Amino acid sequence: MIVDCAVYDSGTRRAGDLALDVALETARSSPEAFVWIGLHEPTPDEFDAVVKEFGLHHLAVEDALQPHQRPKLERYDDTLFLVLKTARYVDPDEVVDIGQVVLFVGDGFVVSVRHGQSAAAAAVRSSLERKPEMLRHGPSAVLHAVVDRVVDDYLEVLHGLENDIDEIEQAVFSTARQNHAERIYKLKREVLEFRRAVAPLAQPIADLENGALPCIAGDIGPYFRDVADHLTRAGEQIEAFDVLLTSALNANLASVGVRQNEDMRKISAWVAIMAVPTMIAGVYGMNFEYMPELDQVWGYPAALTLMAVACLVLFRAFKRNDWL
C-alpha cells in the first residue's frame, strides 16, 4: 500500500497529504517539482495505478513485487530501476534481518517499494526534508540518500557482528569446557547471507558513480564515490569476518579434540592404576592349594601393601607425565 505520497518543489515539500492523482498534477505544474511515492509490500492491484501512471516496464514491476531479488541496477528507457538489500542486526538472536528496497527513478518521479521491516526509506525522507539544498537536485538526490542510508546500515550490522565474533573468540580460547560449534556455524551462515546482500551492489554503485545515466545530476557523482568507499569497507570487513569465523570454528574443533584426548588419557591412567590391585587380587583369588603366602600371618597385609605401593607408583608416574 502507499505509505507516503509527497511533492517536492525547489527543495521543499508541498504541504498536506496528497492523493496520487493530486500529487501528480501538482508535480507537473512546476518544472522543478517531483513526486516521491513510497509503498510497502504492495499487491499487484495496489501497484497497478502507479505502474500505469509512470509507464513502468513490466519486467521491472515483476521484480519489484518479489521480495527476494538480487541487488542490481537496470535501465528501462529513461527510467532507472535499482534493487537494494537492507539489513539490520537482531543482536539477541544473532541474526541479520535482510529486507529489500526497490527504486524507480525517472524524470520528475521516484517510486520506492519496500519489503521487510527496514525503515530506511522513511528515515531518508525525514532526513532529506531537513536538507532542501540536496532536494533541489531532484530524484537523483533521493536515489543517493536511500543508497547512502542502506550502506550506512551495513556498517551498523558489521558493528553488531564484530561484538559477537569477539565474544566467540574469547569463549573458544577460555578454560570453560564448552562446544561453541553450533553458535559459530549459525553466525557464519548469517555472515554469508549478509555477503550475498552486499557484494552484488558494488557494480551498480560504480555505474551510479560514473554518472552516465539518465536522471542523475552531474554534481551528485562525487557523493556516490563516498558511498562506494563505505561499501568497499563493508565488503572487506565481511570477508575478514568470514575468515575469522572459519578460524574460530577450526580452533573450537581442535580444542574439543584436545579435551577429549585429555579425558581419554585420564580414563586410561585410572584404568591402569585400578588394573594392578585387580590383577593381584585375581592371583590370590585362584585358591591354589600350594600358595605359601596364604599360610603366613603377613600374607594378607603384604598383598594389600603391594597393591597400595603399585598404585602409588603408577599414580606419581602418570601425574609426572600430565596424564592426571
Image (cartoon, helix red, strand yellow):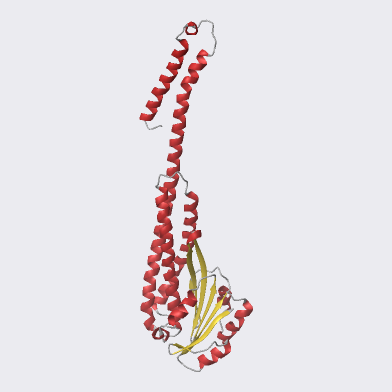
Q: From this viewpoint, which residue is outermost toward the bottom?
A: 29
What residue is drawn where x is 46% and y is 38%? 260
x and y percentages locating residue 98 in the rendered image: 51, 66
Question: Total marks drawn?
Answer: 0
x and y percentages locating residue 269 in the rendered image: 44, 28
Which residue is at the front of the view, 221 or 317? 317
Quadrant of the drawing holding the C terminus: top left
What residue is drawn where x is 56% and y is 74%? 64
Vertical side of 269 occupied by 197: above or below: below
Identify the image quadrant of residue 225. bottom left
Vertical side of 105 occupied by 33: above or below: below
Identify the image quadrant of residue 20. bottom right
What residue is drawn where x is 60% and y is 79%? 47
Identify the image quadrant of residue 141. bottom left
Which residue is at the front of the view, 262 or 60? 262
Residue 206 in sight: yes
x and y percentages locating residue 59 in the rendered image: 57, 76
Which residue is at the front of the view, 175 or 272? 175
Residue 247 in sight: no
Vertical side of 162 occupied by 80: above or below: below
Quadrant of the drawing holding the N terminus: bottom right
Q: From this viewpoint, which residue is outermost toward the right?
A: 45
x and y percentages locating residue 153 in the rendered image: 44, 69
